[in-house]
Image: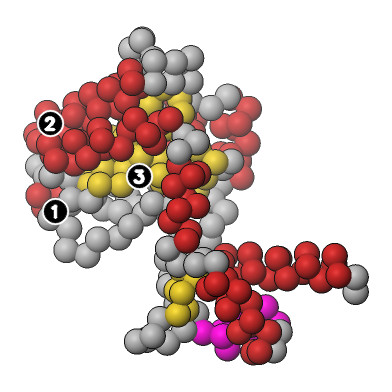
Amino acid sequence: MSSRDAGTKAVARALTVLELFDERTERLTPTEVAAALGVHRSTASRVLATLAHHRLVEADREAGGYVLGLGLVSLAGHVFNRFPVWAVGRSIVRELRNATGETAWLGILDGDEVVYIDQASSPHVRVRADWVGRRQTLTAAVTGAVLLAFQDTEVIEELLRAGRSDGEPAAQSLHASELATIRASGQLARYEDPTSGHAVVAAPVRDHRGTVVAALSLSGLRDRIDLARFDDELIPATRRAATRISEELGHAGANR
């Protein structure tokens, strides 16, 4: 094997290790990495040591193994800075959370998935799950459904035919008629979302060209939200916040 091929293989291994971490795998040992890569434990240890040197992972002295490192935070910041919607939307996402007391998210489209780029958690949530950076199939969440609704007809038909691909059960299938309703109303509101069981509403965010570039969503437990509050407070608040982000991006028309 040439030195160039060896270098390429080493980079591929390092990237594969980073991809092993997800919401279900927060910590990995050299033995676990070796098994995943199909290499000796010593090789896995060298890969982890190299990643640790660049602060992409760090050793967990108390629990053992390795966790993702703070160096990734700096890289993520550079990525988010490429998206004006994140820069102008962060403060509005937090204002929406503060005004309603519920959790607010901002998501963007990436292929056939929604990627959450910002989150402001409700103070009422006991166990806070950080969804920033996580992905969901467009048909699996209210945020994704809003993003899907404003895509070209061909894209919508292709994704609806493909259905879900992430292995999770589909609590409710999306239909073209529902997406048409989202486009007409400029929102998707479910008092009892079949996936989460929460009261959820999402609205599109548009840029200066009128293109939908993100979706803003708000979610809360139904035992804290009656239907009147959902209809009269949370839905209008989410729409207003989405409109404000759109205006900051230069959109001048109605946010539908």
Q: Residue at x 63, y 36 (%)?
A: 158
Per the rendered image, the range of residues in magenta is 29-38
Residue occupied by mark 3: 118
- Left or right: 122, with 229 as reference point: right
Quadrant of the image for the C terminus? top left
On-image quarter of the N terminus: bottom right
Q: CA distance from mark 1 to mark 2?
A: 18 Å
Callout 3: SS: strand
Name the kind of residue labelled 1 in the image.
Answer: Pro
Q: Which mark is residue 233?
A: 2
Q: Residue at 45% across / 53% down in the picture?
A: 74
Q: Is residue 61 above or below residue 168?
A: below
**Residue, far front:** 53
| Residue at the (48%, 14%) spot, across then down | 209
Looking at the rendered structure, the secondary structure element under dot 1 is loop
Of residues 213 and 178, the one drawn nearer to the viewer in this rendering: 213
Residue mark closest to the camera, 2 vs 3: 3
Where does the image place residue 117, in percent across and percent down from the top left?
Answer: 40, 44
Which quadrant of the figure has residue 239? Answer: top left
Residue position marked by numbered label 1 in the rendering? 123
Under mark 3, the amino acid is Asp
